[in-house]
Amino acid sequence: MGTFNAGEGAPVAILNRNEPAFYCVPPALYAQLMEILEDQELGKIADERIGEAVIEVNIDDL
């Protein structure tokens, strides 16, 4: 925790023989990264669906 706290809210790389072994990321930044990844995935799905047939639906029929 001391190493994490020394990062003062920034990501911290933990090294093993001068190679990154893992990264410690604050929860708020991790959540933001997950949102970005989700947005990218949803954008990919939307792009794949461009050109599909449009189905008209009346909300009162549901």
Image (cartoon, rainbow, N blue to C red):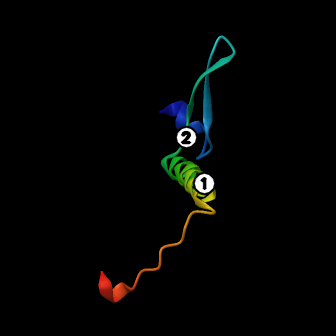
Considering depth in this image, is 48 or 25 the residue closer to the camera? 48
**The disc labelled 2 sits on which kind of residue?**
Val
Q: Nearer the viewer, residue 7 or 49?
A: 49
Say which of marks 2 and 1 sits in front. Answer: 1
Position of residue 21 relative to residue 52, above or below, is: above
Residue 10 position in % (x across, y down): 62, 44
Residue depicted at x 63% and y 63% = 51
Above or below, 16 relative to 31: above
Residue 30 badge: none
Residue at figure coordinates x 55%, y 40% from the top left:
25
Residue assigned mark 2: 25
- Please name the residue that numbered disc 1 is placed on: 48
**Circle 1: element type:** helix
Q: Is residue 36 above or below residue 53?
A: above
Residue with the most extreme top position? 17
Height in image: 60 above or below 47?
Answer: below
Whole-angstrom CA distance, mark 2 to mark 1, is 32 Å
